[in-house]
Image: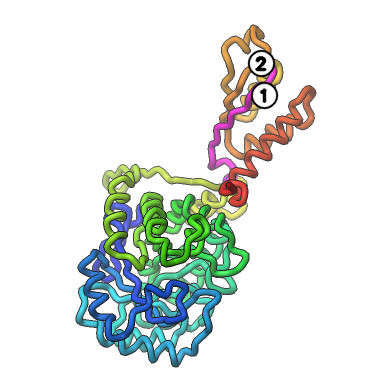
Amino acid sequence: MVVDTTICGLKIGDRYPAQVMGILNLSPESFYKGSVVSPDQVLETALQMVEDGASFLDVGARSTWMFSSPITEEEEAKRLFPVLEALVGNVEAVISVDTMFSEVAEEALKRGADVINDVSGFTADPRLADVVADYDCPAVIMASEKCPGDPLGMDAVMDSLEKILEKAEKAGIDSEKLILDPAFGRWIEAKLPCYDFETLDDLERLQVFEKPILAALSRKSFIGDVLEKPASERLYGSLAVAALAVYNGAHIIRTHDVAETADVVKVAGAFRSRKAVAKEDCYEVSVLSIKTPKDAFREMQKLGTTEAGSRVMQNKSLQLTLKIKNLTTTEALILKQEMLARGGDAALERDAVSHETEKTDVLVFGTLLQLEKLCTKLEGQARKLPRIANLIRECLAERTNPEYRYSR
């Protein structure tokens, strides 16, 4: 499961350095006023971004900040098209256009744009998927359900991207030309910072889709919530999360600050380890990073496994090690026997086996399915084992709860 593709002549994937996408912001309504570029400065700014390390330039004329005043498609086009005419043929970079609307996108492609960046994931204007298919151009699709960026939590991000990819396939879009954006930022009121923290922490989960990952993190609200600073003072916070994103698997970093981000991307990329893959003739063996049963379900569905079979097996896909402290020797031995009976195991202090100690800590090794069956069994046992079962369940629930994981 190695990402390896070419977008407009650029090699994108796990084996290549991450790319930098510079933001050319034409919208005065933007949340970050310092990023707005006047039309007469666009070419100069773009050339500097390319010199500083940008291989993509993302041109946007409509602010998607939830507090910004909306503009018409006519106004968006009026701002955008003259700038495209100034850029196309004059900068050595892939030109991306940030728009949600099919008519704007089609006219932009006619004027030489290379990529469409749709933050609505084909939800704002369904015809946009047809335009992308007709022009056979690459597209960035952002996780969205009813409106841009509304999925709450990584599971919801994954579900929405899966649906968007299905929609793209039905529209006839070449799946090799799609780039995934997990929707960092507070797109809706309900989106708390913990959801962005979870997405960044679990970014590697997106690799189940085998598509390039774009991380649009620059100066976003969750950085401001941590630093308690306005957008104009979030540079260093943006660089920190850019490094984490590259380390966790991002292939493209979208940024307002190209020169600084380019350095960070290079260093973070040097620390990112290669995936274990062995090939010979037609055979290939790779190690998958499966973090949730649902990710295993998706992998099995890609193989063609039956849905019923995938659901049965998904809880067998994830092996966990739990540490339980201060069990009595008798409780520990019961727990070990119950795990062995279910195909798992448990390790405990040597003296506990011969009852030479009253208390022991225990390491429990098992799949989610084995642990669930263990808890069910322990609930009917004597001593404090029902309480241990409740603690195991509570611990497993906390492991996937973003509000718990990132509360401070």
Decide: is 237 above or below 170.
Answer: above
Disc 1 on helix, strand or loop? helix
Residue 128 x/y as whole percent: 46, 81
Task: Report the Cα–Cα distance between label 1 and label 2.
Answer: 13 Å
Q: Residue at x 30, y 51 (%)?
A: 269
Task: Report whether residue 304 is seen.
Answer: no
Disc 2 on helix, strand or loop? strand
Left or right position of 290 against 281: right
In front here: 314 or 115? 115
User: Given the image, on which type of amino acid does mark 1 rest?
Assistant: Leu
Labelled disc at residue 335: 1
Labelled disc at residue 359: 2
In front here: 37 or 254? 37
Decide: is 155 above or below 323.
Answer: below
Q: Is 317 one of the magenta-colored residues?
A: yes
Q: Few, some or many C-alpha atoms within 10 Å of disc 2 (few <14, some 14-19, many ≥20)?
A: some
Q: Nearer the viewer, mark 1 or mark 2?
A: 2
Figure label count: 2
Residue 404 x/y as whole percent: 62, 47
